[in-house]
Structure formats: C-alpha cells, structure tokens
C-alpha cells in the first residue's frame, strides 16, 4: 500500500507526466501570464520572515545550476514561459522558486510569471486533472501558451521510500535536481 502511494505521489511530482490537451493553445494560460507577477514583485509581497527564508535558498540556487542545465538553456529554440502557482508562506516555494527563477534568468528565451494558488487553481485543476494544486506548481509553456510539462512541489528524489521528505532536500542540497527537472521539460538535449 505504501509503495503504491509513494509511486502515485512521485508520478504527480514528475515533470514528464503527460499533459492533457497537449498541443492546443491555452487561452486560460495566456490570461494567467498576463496577470502574473514577476519574481521580485512576488517575493516583495511576502512577510519579512518568508522573504528571509526564500533569500537563504536564493544564495544556494545561484550556485546550483549545473553545466548541463546552463548549456541546454543557452541553446533553446524559440521562446517560452514558466507559469508558477506559488505562495510566499510555503517552504517548498522557498526552496524551489529561487531555482526556477535562476533557470528563467539564465535564458533570455524564458519569461517567468508567478500567480497565487487561488488564482491558478481552477485552470490547473481543469487542465491537469489534479484534485489539489500542490505548490510550487510550475508549468512550462511554449510561445503559444501551450503546456509542455510541469514541475510539481519538489524534485522526485526529495521523497523517501515511505513518502517522507528527505533531510537533504530540507537543507537545500537538491536544488540542482530541481533545475534539471525543470530544464528537462524544454525541447533539446
């Protein structure tokens, strides 16, 4: 039973799960992008305590982009957006949002937009068939706002055999894995 739940949980977090309606431009995603905050705006909306928690991982995130990620991002064809549902109070957002920002900032072809979970909930639930929008929930969109894939909550290897969050993730030691999972969604090698 626990193995089944762990598998299901890992499947929802995986950035390469099939995207329903893939290939169809998504007006709802375009509308969310138009109202999205940029990274600094979003971070500025949080409490001082939450900003400090996130800033701790920002320092680590800027060093976490592996060479293979940087190489792939430098060769991206076309333009893309990363639309993230996030909240400043969320510990997983504190860890992963700075990495997602670093990925976007390292490639001029990528725009980052952040919305609250409440704002994204109806669209994300309808499009991805999830009961709950776990955060951060990052959707990689092509230039037509068509979803290519998603990164949900934390990297796959952040969860132990019994579904527990492992200590190395809590300490910010898996930020490179977040970068790799997000980057794996973009086309190219």
Image (cartoon, rainbow, N blue to C red):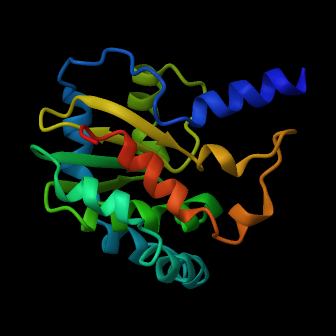
Is 14 left, or right, of 186 in this rendering? right
Percent coordinates x, y for residue 94 in the rendering = 56, 68
Q: Residue at x 30, y 48 (%)?
A: 82
Residue at 16%, 53% in the rendered image = 75
Quarter that holds the N terminus? top right
Which is more toward the observer, 35 or 16? 16
Query: Who is closer to the viewer here, 27 or 62?
Result: 62
Residue 103 is situated, as x and y percent measured from the top left of the image, at 33, 61
182 left or right, relative to 129: left
Residue 132 visible, this orientation: no
Q: How many marks?
A: 0
Q: Is residue 152 above or below residue 125?
A: below
14 vs 98, nearest the viewer:
14
Q: Position of residue 138 (x, y in %)?
A: 42, 45
Q: Which quadrant would the C terminus be assigned to in this image?
A: top left
> Residue placed farthest to the left in the image?
78
Residue at the image position 26 percent from the left and 35 percent from the top: 29
> Image quadrant of residue 10?
top right
**Which residue is pictured at 47% across the width and 46% down the height?**
181
Q: Taking 78 as reference, is 38 above or below it? A: below
**Left or right of 11: which side holds 187?**
left
Residue 52 versus residue 57: which sits nearer the camera?
A: 57
Where's residue 85, x and y in %? Answer: 44, 48
Q: Is residue 152 visible?
A: yes
């Amino acid at each position: 039973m626990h193995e089944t739940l762990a598998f299901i949980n890992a499947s929802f977090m995986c950035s390469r799960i099939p995207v329903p309606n893939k290939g169809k431009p998504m007006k709802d995603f375009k509308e969310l992008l138009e109202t999205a905050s940029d990274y600094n705006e979003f971070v500025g909306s949080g409490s001082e305590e939450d900003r400090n928690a996130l800033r701790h991982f920002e320092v680590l995130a800027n060093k976490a982009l592996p060479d293979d990620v940087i190489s792939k991002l430098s060769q991206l064809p076309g333009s893309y957006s990363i639309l993230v549902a996030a909240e400043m109070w969320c510990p997983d957002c504190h860890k992963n949002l700075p990495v997602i920002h670093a990925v976007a900032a390292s490639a001029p072809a990528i725009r980052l937009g952040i919305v609250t979970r409440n704002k994204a909930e109806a669209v994300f639930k309808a499009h991805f068939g999830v009961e709950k929008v776990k955060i951060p929930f990052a959707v990689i969109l092509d230039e037509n706002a068509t979803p290519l894939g998603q990164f949900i909550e934390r990297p796959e290897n952040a969860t132990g055999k019994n579904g527990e969050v492992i200590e190395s993730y809590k300490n910010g030691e898996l930020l490179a894995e977040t970068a790799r999972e997000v980057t794996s969604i973009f086309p190219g090698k």
